[in-house]
Image (cartoon, coloured by chain):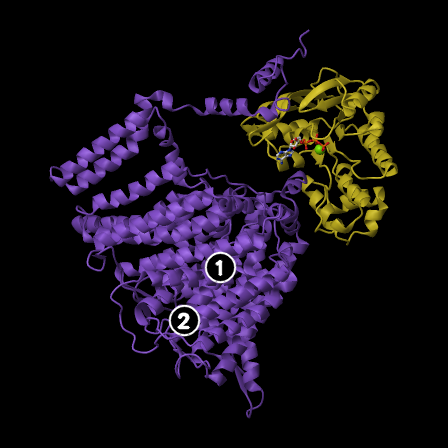
Chain colours: A yellow, B purple
Amino acid sequence: MSTQILADQILTETSAPVSAQPSTQPPMLEFADVRTAYGDIEVIHGVSLSIKRGSVFALLGPNGAGKSTLLKVCAGLLPPTGGEVRIGGITVHKPGQVAIADELARRGLCLIPEGKGIFPNLTVRDNLWMMTNTGKSLSQIEEVAYSQFPRLGERRRQMAGTLSGGEQQMLAMSRALSTDPALLLLDELSMGLAPIIVQDLYEIVGRVSELGVSILVVEQFARTVLGVADEAAIMVSGLVSRVGDPAELEEELEAVYLGGEH
Amino acid sequence: MDEFIVNTIIGLAFGAIYAIASSGLVVTYATSGIFNFAHGAVGMFAAFLYWQFRWGWNWPAPIAIILVVVVICPVFGILLERFVIRGLRNTMEITKIVVPIALLLLLTGGASWIWGGTEPETMRRFWGNARIRIGDSAGAIFISWHHIIVMIVAIALAALLFVVLYVTRMGVTMRAVVDNPELTQLNGGRPNRASAMSWAIGSSMAGIAGVLIASLQNAAINSFALTLLVVNAYAAAIFGKLRSLTLTFVGSIVIGLAVSYWNWISDIGQKWRWLSGFRVSIPVLLLFAMLVLLPHERLRGAVVARVKERFRMPTLSKSFIWAGAIVVFFLAAMPVIQRGPVLLLSTGLALGVISLSLVLLTGYAGEINLAPLTFAGIGAIVAQQFDVGNSPRSEFSLVGVIFLILVGATIGWVIGLLFRKAYGRKAVTISTIVFAGLGAVSAIWLEGESSGAYIRESMSLTGILVVAVVCALVGAIVALPALRLRGLYLGLATFAFAVFVTNMIFKQRSTLNLNIPWVGDGEDFGINLFTGGGVFISRPSWLGIDFNDSSKAYMVLLAAVFAIIGLGLVLLRRSAYGRQLAAMKDSPAACATLGLNIVRLKLSVFALSSAIAGVGGVFYVAIVRTANEDSFVIFASLPIVLLLVVAGIGYVSGAFAGGILTGVFFVMMSDVFGKLSADYSSFEWLFNDVIKNFFFFVGPAFAALTLASNPGGFLNDMFKNYRPLATRKGLPLLAAWGVFQGLFYWSLNLQWVGMWTFMLISLGVALLLPAIAQVLVPSLYIDEATLKARREATQLELIGIDRDFTREDIMSIDAALKLPASEVGEK
Ligand SMILES: Nc1ncnc2c1ncn2[C@@H]1O[C@H](COP(=O)(O)OP(=O)(O)OP(=O)(O)O)[C@@H](O)[C@H]1O
Ligand SMILES: [Mg+2]
């Protein structure tokens, strides 16, 4: 249980802008040789990554690489079978000792899961209401969401499941914008959306990052994300094959998707 | 008109109570995905508690109500959620069904234990019989205050529930959990807290419904009847698709009114006496209809993770050895055993045979039947008609037979048409054939002499065959509407069927009289189903042995019957048909796309399973030669299902152990402690009042509650340690044990040791066998880590995914495939 309290301190203390942080501080998020499995089948075979405070980190890779799984481990939805996850230098997850997902969420970790990060049988307003669990009031959240995405405001009484794909993604993103997270994990924002909307969404991601939020973005094909990323990594078959500058990785990425050597 | 108003008000009052109960059920199901079979029992228990406080101890009514409904019920709900429901989250479907049923039995057993005395617990209405008068003095109607209170409470609770769910954040969270528990967590919501809250609310509503309906009775209350009364609300919950509170309310009112109007109309009628059980059957009939008619995919609640269980395939040689061992064991027991244990063991074996029907149906095919004893009871009735009363007459009137077959076919055709839209043309064909078959059977039946019933000396083999055929047909008929149902819904449908059959047949007190043209004599259709309140079946006289004379021989016969049917099941499991069943269990949809005929598979497995249950029922009744109306009720079926799941529903051995547990173990334990308390009277409170009653009333339920932690059944776990003994290395040890046991048995026969000593030492040695083996031949047992490593090493297809594909892998594959060594990556 003590890890949760630690996570609390870490997450709330570190949401200050990046410039204010002395360089000696540990990275915001660190995976140290993390392994995990669904049942007997191991899908992540020892991943080590570190995400600096206030930076945008892009994690790229083909289908089934284990990107979403890694985010699940980080958010506390799936226990690691090996290694450690550290936030602000303090261990939050390791085998046999996992911080509870909703505790982490209330303390500033925000994962927008892949696909539909919304409750389809709740109205738009009820969806926003759920976000108040993180401490903001409903009116504050509504204000941010509706000003950022006016379309949601028009549809506040509509069931979220009947929104268009883009509107659903906006609703999901509202949580990232309105709840003031310290660490933001985004899983395939672009899934099934028109390029123009994707561009809009990543513009927003860029703005959020300027507020000092550390962001880990997972994408498959993502020129757009490399534009906002400070650093990037490629993940293939449960292992990180390359970490480096986004521009450098772009070429390499093509090789991975075309099935070449890596 | 006045009567109409009065009956409407009575119906509305009942409907209001059903609405309270069913909306509580919906709230809990929606947030946890667990259907609380015990909901009715919670209401029942609350009513008894209220009785205790209000009438037992004479507390003021408001205090009693608040204590029960606002304190005890919610706390119970929270504890339940925390310690039972939460553990069920990622378990198999049958466990999710069985554990709440265990809870149901725990509560009914507990109520019988606490309030099972001879004094009736009489409830009175609130405000006694005070009534209000509506209308002028000429056509005045009197309505009791209780009915009015009930309706007001229902409306107030509905409003309150609405406010909680839609106007508070906790309510939003509760609805969010239904949609997506993980996302709820990511939003910072606490799914566990929401779930606990919903169980607190649900239990409280069950409690309110229980108290209201029990006091509405204005009479003595009975735990089983009261439980079933609240169960009536289940139909309404299904009508609301276990989701919609509005529809649930509407459904409740409809059920309440339907029961009330039927009561009124049938009071006017009084014509068909045999329909008198119909009133109490209306809600379960509606439940059945609702399950069958509502589109299945619309019945959904919380997203439930599917967990697949894997049962090993039984090997043939071992099955033969086991079958032989069982028969030999009971043969060996014959000389030394006494009469009491013989009857107990026989009961256990007969229940084992009945359990085999579930091993086939649930273990192999993945379909659920919560009422094996209902089919057993039908089998017993059929046996009584064919074996005992009537012997077929020699001269058939062919016209009559053909007539009845045609009538059957027509009925079947019409019924088939009803289902054609849902199931296609096949439904018509199948139901026509099934009903034509029924017509043929009933022709033979009716042609028999209907008068002058005499007790046949012994059970006949043809009688058993007829039982199997009739039960198979009944099973198929029940399965026909239920074809699309699976899991929970099928379980509920069989539950409803059991209650219906109990009301209409097992409790039937009138003779069904009917004259069918061209068939038999003047009054050919006079069936006394359970008219005398019981069935009577003699034991057989086969192979020159009259089993009526020897209970011990009959016990061995039962063991042989069990062994034969069990072996048959093993053979069936290993056949192509058995593999098809297994495939259907895994995924009916995938099977259908592969071209398997799901309809035929399902109908046939239901038919076969019902036939086994029916035959088992005949042998079961013949143990003591008689059974009464309570022998086959749903509350007797449920412990059998429970203990079978505990013992391992996927295996024939599970049926054996389950039968012995139900028929022998718990009875014997309560017996032993009863005797102990007689010997040590100062400890009577402990031995008799606590331990004996524990085993007697709630033992099976407690055993089933362990499933929440060990879903595979305990027997499988126990056998895991014995399995290495059956390998070549373990054989000498096994042989040594056999020799020891043989010599020991010999010494028992020579009376060197007593019966108790023999039993205890034999049991002890058998239990210690794996431990002894571990010391003597440690290499038999490989630890978990090695096993896991070995398993991983053999997963060839995962090399390259789970770990890098190395040069050694290429070489080993080359070697395995006998290819010339390749040059890949040599540099
Ligand atoms: N719930 C689960 N149970 C079992 N295996 C799973 C589960 N979820 C994912 N997997 C497996 O784990 C591996 C990694 O899946 P993951 O979803 O993390 O991939 P991903 O990199 O996010 O892929 P994508 O880009 O397609 O979203 C896959 O092989 C997948 O089949
Ligand atoms: Mg993914």
Q: Nearer the viewer, residue A61 or B84?
A: A61
Task: Work out whether residue B295 can be spotted.
Answer: yes
> Quick check: B288 left or right of A182?
left
Q: Quadrant of residue A39?
A: top right
- In screen coordinates, is B523 left or right of B490? left
In this orientation, does residue B370 appear?
A: no
A152 shown above or below A219: below
Question: Disc 1 on helix, strand or loop?
Answer: helix
Judge the density around disc 1: few (<14), some (14-19), many (≥20) Cα neighbours within 10 Å. Answer: many
Give the tally of numbered discs. Answer: 2
Q: Amino acid at mark 2?
A: Ile
The picture quadrant for ligand 1 comes to top right
* Residue type, mark 1 in image: Thr
**Residue B140 image point, x, y percent:** 55, 88
In the depicted structure, whether residue B664 falls above or below residue B716: below
Spot occupied by residue B72 in the image (x, y as percentages of width and height):
46, 55
Observer-nearest of B109 and B95: B95
Classify residue A85 by image quadrant. top right
Quadrant in which the N terminus of chain B appears: bottom right
Q: Residue at x 79, y 24 (%)?
A: A258
The percent position of residue B492, horizontal first and vertical second, equals 51, 58
Q: Name the residue carrying label 2.
A: B444
Q: Residue at x 49, y 59 (%)?
A: B494
Picture residue at 40% right of the left edge, 71% below the top: B445
Residue tagged 1: B494
